[in-house]
Amino acid sequence: MFIQKTKLFLDLSKNQKASLISFIKNFTRKNASLSTDEVFSEFYDDEMYYSQVGNPHFGWIIPQFESEDFIKQIKFLISQYKKEIELKEKQKPYIEKQKLYMKEQRKKARDFHWSKEPPSPKQLSYYKSLCKKYKLDMASVENLSKLDLKNMISAIIDEHEQDVYRCLEKN
């Protein structure tokens, strides 16, 4: 797409070209359900409306609409962005699977790292406060890792939540 962008709108300045291409990309994304000609028609109508109101997005674009080459370039750009949007939609399930896989890998790496570390003082004090709160006997935490203590804390919290749900179901 980069090579194609460099060949488009050669008569515009660098800033004009960049702002027009960015605007067309966003406009196409908003109107992705429409065909290329319909998106161009909407874009043209939008620019004409704002020009008549006296607040155009691009004041220099109105005379450019008389050029057939300019219109072809805009339609080509819109069609390329539509293809890009369709491709991203097709790839979405694979990207989501990849994100889930990477999330699992990060969790495994964190768990492995935590299995080698001693528990933090905050973790120890939280465990002690949970044991006092729920009147549980404290297990020995001398040889436990950060991961082991995290799992113990999670088990205590899960057990308490289940007790609360059982009480609510009875009532």
Image (cartoon, rainbow, N blue to C red):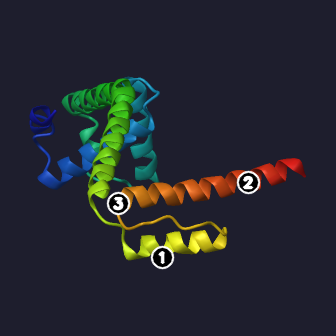
- Label 1 sits on a secondary structure element that is helix
**Image side of residue 88 versus residue 132, left or right:** left
Q: What residue type is labelled 2?
A: Asp
- Label 2 sits on a secondary structure element that is helix
Extreme residue toward the right, this view? 171
Rounded to the nearest angstrom, the CA distance separating label 3 from label 2 is 27 Å
Rounded to the nearest angstrom, the CA distance separating label 2 from label 1 is 23 Å
Which of disc 1 and disc 3 is earlier in sequence? 1
Q: Dot 1 corresponds to which residue?
A: 125
Q: Dot 3 corresponds to which residue?
A: 145
Q: Which residue is drawn at 26% across and 33% down?
A: 74
Q: Between tags 3 and 2, which lies in front?
A: 3
Q: Dot 2 corresponds to which residue?
A: 163
Q: Position of residue 161 (x, y in %)?
A: 68, 55
Q: Which amino acid does label 1 sit on?
A: Ser
Up the image or down, 148 lies above or below 63; here it is below
Q: How crowded is mark 1: few (under 14 residues within 10 Å), some or many (20 or more)?
A: few
Q: Nearer the viewer, residue 122 or 68?
A: 122
Q: Position of residue 139 (x, y in %)?
A: 50, 64
Q: Which amino acid does label 3 sit on?
A: Ser
Q: Which residue is drawn at 28% across and 37% down?
A: 65
Q: Residues within 10 Å of mark 3 (few under 14, many from 20)?
A: some
